[in-house]
Amino acid sequence: MNIDIIQKKSGIVGRSDALVKVLEMVAQVSPVDISVLISGESGTGKEIFAKAIHQNSKRSHESIVTVNCGAIPEGIIESELFGHKKGAYTDAKGDRKGYFETANKGSIFLDEIGETPLDTQVKLLRVIESGEFMPVGESKVKKTDVRIIAATNKDLSELVEKGKFRQDLYYRLNTVSLKLPSLNERVEDIALLVERFALEFTRNNDMVYRGFVPDAIRVMKNHEWKGNIRELKNFVESIIVLEKGERISGEMVDSQLGKKQIDLSKNETLPVLTNQPTDAAERDLILRQLFLLRQDVEFLKQLASPTQAPIGNINTPLINNSESHQPAGLINEDSEYFIKNSSIGDMTIEDLEKEAIIRTLKFFKNNRRASAKSLGMSERTLYRKINFYGLERKIKNQ
C-alpha cells in the first residue's frame, strides 16, 4: 500500500524519515486483522493514526468507535464498554448498547488504555480473545466482531511490573506496536504542519492569512514542543488571532513563545519549509508557501550572488537566476529540497498566484487597495497581474 494514499485519506502531514517509517508500518498492518498498540507522548496524534489504520483496513466500510478510557469514571466504564440492561443500576432506565456492540464489524479505538481499572481489564481480555462479553445486569453472553486498536502515553510494560496492568492483556494488545515520534523528532515537518493548521483555521473563521516568514518557521523549529503537535496547532491558531492577520515574523513567534530570540546568524543554511510531497493536499500547502516566499526572492538572490558579502555564517545557496520572477534552483537544508522546479504536480506558481488574487479580492469584496496590501504588492502590480491573467471577468462574477 502506498503511504501517499494513506496520507491523503487520513490527512497526516509530513515527510520526515521518522514519520515515513511509521507510515510504512501502518501500510503493512492495516490490511491484516490484528490488534495494534499505538504508543507515544501526549499530542503526537495517536487517534489520527488509529483512524488511518481503520480507513485502510478491510473494515473501512464500517465505523470506528473511539473510547477515551481515561475519561470514563471507574464506576460506569463497564457499562460504557459493554452496555447494560434496564434496571442494572439506579439510573439504568432502559437497555443500552455498549461501545463494543456498537462497533460490531468495524474497529474500536481504546485511547489511554493504561487508565483502565484492573477488574475491567479481565473483561477486555475476554472480548479480545473470544469476542464475547456480557452487558451489566445481563446473564446472557453476547458476541461482537471488532478490530482492537489501543493507545497509551505510558509505558505499559512498566505498569505490568508494578501490577497496575495485566500482563496477559498487554501481550494480547501488543501484537503489533506502533511508536509515534514526538514533534521534536520530526522538526522538518513543522513547516507543513504550520501551514496546514493556519489554512484550516483561517478558512474556517473567514480570516485573512498572509503566512509565516522563513525566520518564523526557523524559530519554531528550534523550540521544544513538549505538547507536540497539539501544542503547535494551538500556538499557530493563537498567534494568527493575536497578530490580527499580519504576516507572522520570527520576532512575533519568539515573543509569543516567551523565548529569547534565537541568534539566526549561527544557522549554517537558509531555512527550508518542506520537501516536495506527492498528494494534492500537501501540494497545495507547498504552493501557498512558495507564493509567500516570492516576496523574499530579492533577498534570496542577494544571498546567492557571488558578489554579495556573506551575512554571519550563512552559506550561500545556489539559485538559478535565469527567471527573475521565481527561484528555480535548490535551497538545501538537512539534505531536503525546497524547490525543485517552477511547478509541483500539475499546478504552477502562476496557478497559485491567480488563486491567491481571486480569493483575496473576494474576501475584500473587490477592494483592490486592501487586496494589494494583503498580498504584499502595489495596486499597480495587482492591476497588471489581473490583466495579465485575464481575471477581470471572473472577479466581476464573484
Image (tube, helix red, strand yellow):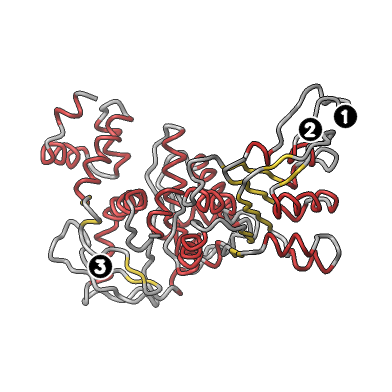
Q: Is residue 5 above or below residue 237?
A: below
Q: Earlier in the sequence, mark 2 or mark 3?
A: 2
Looking at the image, do the residues carrying marks 2 and 1 touch, with CB atoms under 8 Å apart?
yes
Q: Characterize the local packing of mark 2: few (<14), some (14-19) or many (20 or more) Cα atoms within 10 angstroms.
A: many
Q: From this view, report whether residue 395 is shown above or below residue 304.
A: above
- Between 58 and 257, which is closer to the camera in this rendering? 58
Label 1 neighbour load within 10 Å: few <14, some 14-19, many 20+: few
Residue 142: x and y in percent read 73, 39
Callout 2: helix, strand or loop? loop
Residue 45 image point, x, y percent: 57, 53
* Spot occupied by residue 262 in the image (x, y as percentages of width and height): 51, 66
Identify residue for label 1.
Answer: 89
> Callout 3: helix, strand or loop?
helix
Q: Amino acid at mark 3?
A: Gln
Amino acid carrying label 1: it is Tyr
Q: Earlier in the sequence, mark 2 or mark 1?
A: 2
